[in-house]
Amino acid sequence: MNKTFKLTERAPYKLNDKLYKVYQNTVSNPGNIHNLCTNFSVPFILKIVLNLGLSFVPPTQPSIPTIAKLFNEGIRKIGWKIYFKLNKNESNFSEFDNLIWNLNKNKNFKTKKSIEIHNELFSENLLKSFINEVKLRTRNSNLIPKSLLLSLRTMITSNNIIIKPTDKNSGIAVMNAEDYDTEIFRQLSNTNFYTEVSEYTYHNNIELLKHKIISAMERKLLPAEIKKLIPNHHSPAKFYILPKVHKQYESFPQGRPISNAKPTFTAGISKLLDKLLQPIIHHIPEIIIDSSHFILRLQELKLCPTHKYTLVTIDVEALYTNLKLENCLKYCTSLFTQYKERSNTILDIETSSIEFLLNCCLLNHYIKYKDSFYYQHQGIPMGSSCSVSVANLTVFKELETNFTQSEIIFKCRFIDDIFLILDSTNIIDTEQWIKEACQHHYLTFTHSYSEISINFLDLTIKLEEESNVITTHLFSKPTNRHKYLHFYSDHPIHTLKAIPYSQGIRIIRICSQAEDREREIEILLTKFTERCYPARLMDQCRDKLKLMSRFDLLKPKTDFLINHLRINNPNILRIYGVRGTTSHHNNNKVFIVMPFYKNILNYSNIIKYLIQFSINNCNNEEIKTIAQNLEYIISFKRNAILSLLLKEN
């Protein structure tokens, strides 16, 4: 049994060198932890642990039952894959089938034939051999004593404390649960958006919705495939907030509302709607997919050096909660009708069915916090899979007559963020011009503008004086603490190496000037060094990034971006030599998902070796040949993160 770690004992950072480095980092970065409690002083030892990050995975001893369960699941998937190959079903496995598979991936798919294949390939002793190898190759790991985590959890629980990340990546908030609850109930009591209902009302209305969907399928008003999207178990969306500590407040900051719609009854239908509506977005030229898309669009633009230009950013205030549901339904349905024949959708479905499913998702969103249930009657649900697509299409129609003035020579939009370049040579009052352009009968806007530089998404866009050449630079909000995943977290080394490298690639894409890129990369690597990434690894990362070509990194690669450019900006594809979509589905890959433990030596190799050994000893040549031609990829899932370990079960 683990002894309880007394918080009065010698500081844990003295137990090993790694924690001492974390201690030093905590001392040098005191502003990362925001204590919002009026009657609780955060112990320094808790600050040290929290400074590792709420997504930090403390190295622990392997959970043998978990490992055994997922190993069995992995080899079962191999039998299922071979079953598909033998029956030549893969060619008929549509994108809709893939959606259903992903929605039900935790279910135990089995057929008599797949079980027979499994038994032909793998002996009963395979699992036992694997577990024995794991035990032999496991080293002790004790970065954070388990007793310390238990003591901290007890302290947090007994003091009625809640710990959450803050809004805008500005650190971690330590709060009284009573204050946190008060802010949540303040938001949920706003009758403009929510109505409190009983638990009975929630279950009764969802049951009525279920019968309505089944009845529509029986009357052929919905495709029969929709039945596969109806879950056996469901619950209301989970509601929480991220405190806005970067804004001024008196006793407690307002919170950014977040709802997790994953467990809801309509989660599967929402995913299908997103897949159906995404192709429609390709026909809306103003929409940008990401920062790279925005840069590609800007590069096409040539400004006259003798004209005066103004850079403008406009934000639609509280878009999700303010959009009118009746307009969302009307506009999404009409756009689907308009572009359906020119879009490649994953399911042959009528416009009336789209309207029916949108009604199901948008008009049946329930939220639960503690024991209280709420119905959202205004705005589209945050956290729902289709919400971004619905918002994109609806805003396009809502603002169809806005921002059409001849002075606008460039326009793009990322959901609720709008970017304009005005030829302001003949505009006398820019402020008044923008205010008049932003008139709408119910949506409201905030805006900023400059003739020199402006921030948009994660970029700063600048106009060079005299030449009007556009340059792009990295923009990071002042509140961002840049607390990347800590190097001591129990993650695979390839993941830890990939994080600084991918962030460096992002800098190369964004920064149009070489000296700017070099400076930002050095700043980036310093931030990772503060998170205990070794100097040798940072040197390797720097050397790799020096070899990267910005032209190659900006080259469109995803099917979604390529399809959007093909319709709206084909010249960009010609410049980069992109002729077709780039992704090719490999039907021979089998992903075996396992929990990761840094302290198991040669973990991946053990799994691959035992699987290959079993396949090579299979007596059924047909099954053996198929199994040998499959590619086995060990994919790891993380164990319990710090935020869960410090929370009461």
Image (cartoon, rainbow, N blue to C red):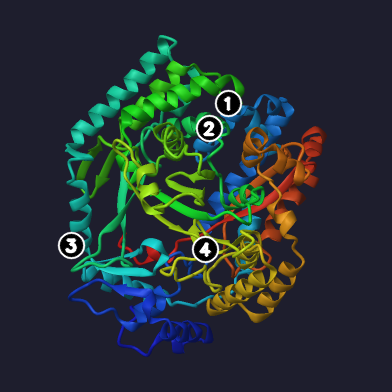
Marked residue nearer the N-terminal end (3 or 2): 3
* Image mark for residue 294: none
Which of the pair 455/230 is nearer the observer? Answer: 455
User: Which callout, 3 or 2, points to the residue nearer the camera?
Assistant: 2
Would residue 349 appear left or right of 552 to someone viewing this image?
left
Q: Is residue 1 visible?
A: no
Badges 2 and 1: C-beta atoms under 8 Å apart?
A: yes
Q: Is residue 189 above or below residue 359?
A: below
Q: Could you say where residue 410 lies in the image, as x and y percent from the top left?
A: 55, 45
Q: In front: mark 1 or mark 3?
A: 1
- Place residue 500 in its image quadrant: bottom right
Query: Between 118 and 364, which is closer to the camera in this rendering?
Result: 364
Q: Amino acid at mark 2?
A: Lys
Provide the secondary structure element on which disc 2 rests: helix
Looking at marks 3 and 4 on the same chain, the residue that comes earlier in the sequence is marked by 3
Q: Which mark is residue 178?
A: 3
Position of the C terminus, as image quadrant, is bottom left
The numbered disc on residue 345 is 1
Could you give the CA–CA distance between mark 1 and mark 3, rounded to whole angstroms? 48 Å
Give amino acid for label 4. Answer: Ile
Task: Say whether residue 489 is visible.
Answer: yes
Which amino acid lies under the numbered mark 3 shown in the image of this protein?
Glu
Name the outermost residue toward the top: 219
Q: Residue at x 39, y 53 (%)?
A: 429
Mark 2 and mark 3 in contact (Cβ < 8 Å)? no
Crowding at dot 3, Cα within 10 Å, few <14 / some 14-19 / many 20+, comes out as few
Dot 2 or dot 4, earlier in sequence = 2
